[in-house]
């Protein structure tokens, strides 16, 4: 365990807790956290995860700007939580599956990547979940549950026990986030 992994872990928990509360400050904290984890994952040859952190940085910057619209200096985003249409959700998942296989195969053939298919799943479906979160789609939490489940095993196998523990916390926080955002949706309709 490195000090960077510890700092990234603490910032990750804080950032997700703020996301659950729909607090805009979760985005800048997330930017710092993903910058740190870019190095942590690169160092253990989880290249797809390192690349994922770079992509997260871009999506988090977008999410911060998107949630800030109409917030009028408030910390809590005023954007409504919405749901994807079933057909759109199915297409996102199908596309994610195809991209996972393609990216995992590419990483397996061209790098010394550890666990390339599982790492590819984490990459692709994390990007989907992060995008849905930036757009305040309730499905982001189901996406995070799937990603976190896989990530726990991958990080444990790669001797990143603290990071695996972080993803156990993220898994639990995903359940909490799903419940909180569903409550928000029900308040929006009344």
Image (spheres, rainbow, N blue to C red):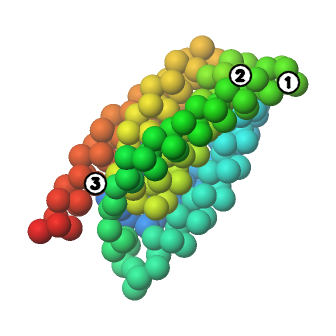
Question: Could you say where residue 190 lies in the image, as x and y percent from the top left?
Answer: 12, 68
Would you call the spot at circle 2 few (<14 residues within 10 Å), some (14-19), or many (20 or more)? Answer: many
For residue 146, side relative to residue 103 (left or right) = left
- Direction right: furthest residue: 110
Question: Could you say where residue 104 lies in the image, as x and y percent from the top left?
Answer: 72, 26
Judging depth in this view, the residue of 178 and 166 nearest the camera is 178
Quadrant position of residue 97: top right
Q: Alpha-carbon distance for marks 2 and 1?
A: 9 Å
Q: Alpha-carbon distance for marks 3 and 2?
A: 33 Å
For residue 94, side relative to residue 82 (left or right) = right
**Res 181 label:** 3
Q: Name the residue under label 1.
A: 111
Judging depth in this view, the residue of 42 and 107 nearest the camera is 107
Q: Alpha-carbon distance for marks 3 and 1?
A: 39 Å
Question: Could you say where residue 79 lies in the image, as x and y percent from the top left?
Answer: 36, 71
In terms of secondary structure, where does tag 2 sit? helix
Q: Residue at x 39, y 80 (%)?
A: 71
Q: Are marks 2 and 1 in contact (CB under 8 Å)?
A: yes
**Res 116 label:** 2
Whichever of callouts 3 and 2 sits on the residue coming sooner in the sequence is 2
In terms of secondary structure, where does tag 1 sit? loop
Residue 52 lies, with reference to residue 67, above or below; the image says: above
């Amino acid at each position: 365990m490195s000090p960077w992994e510890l700092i990234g872990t603490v910032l990750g928990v804080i950032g997700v807790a703020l996301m659950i509360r729909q607090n805009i400050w979760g985005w800048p904290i997330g930017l710092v956290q993903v910058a740190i984890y870019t190095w942590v994952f690169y160092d253990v040859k989880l290249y797809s995860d390192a690349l994922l952190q770079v992509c997260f940085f871009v999506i988090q910057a977008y999410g911060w700007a998107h949630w800030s619209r109409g917030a009028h200096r408030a910390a809590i985003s005023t954007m409504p939580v919405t749901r994807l249409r079933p057909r759109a959700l199915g297409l996102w998942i199908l596309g994610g599956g195809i991209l996972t296989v393609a990216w995992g195969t590419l990483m397996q053939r061209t790098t010394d990547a550890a666990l390339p298919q599982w790492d590819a799943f984490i990459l692709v479906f994390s990007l989907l979940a992060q995008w849905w979160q930036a757009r305040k789609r309730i499905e982001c939490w189901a996406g995070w549950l799937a990603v976190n489940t896989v990530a726990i095993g991958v990080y444990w196998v790669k001797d990143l026990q603290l990071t695996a523990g972080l993803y156990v916390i993220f898994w639990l926080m995903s359940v909490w986030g799903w419940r909180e955002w569903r409550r928000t949706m029900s308040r929006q309709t009344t």
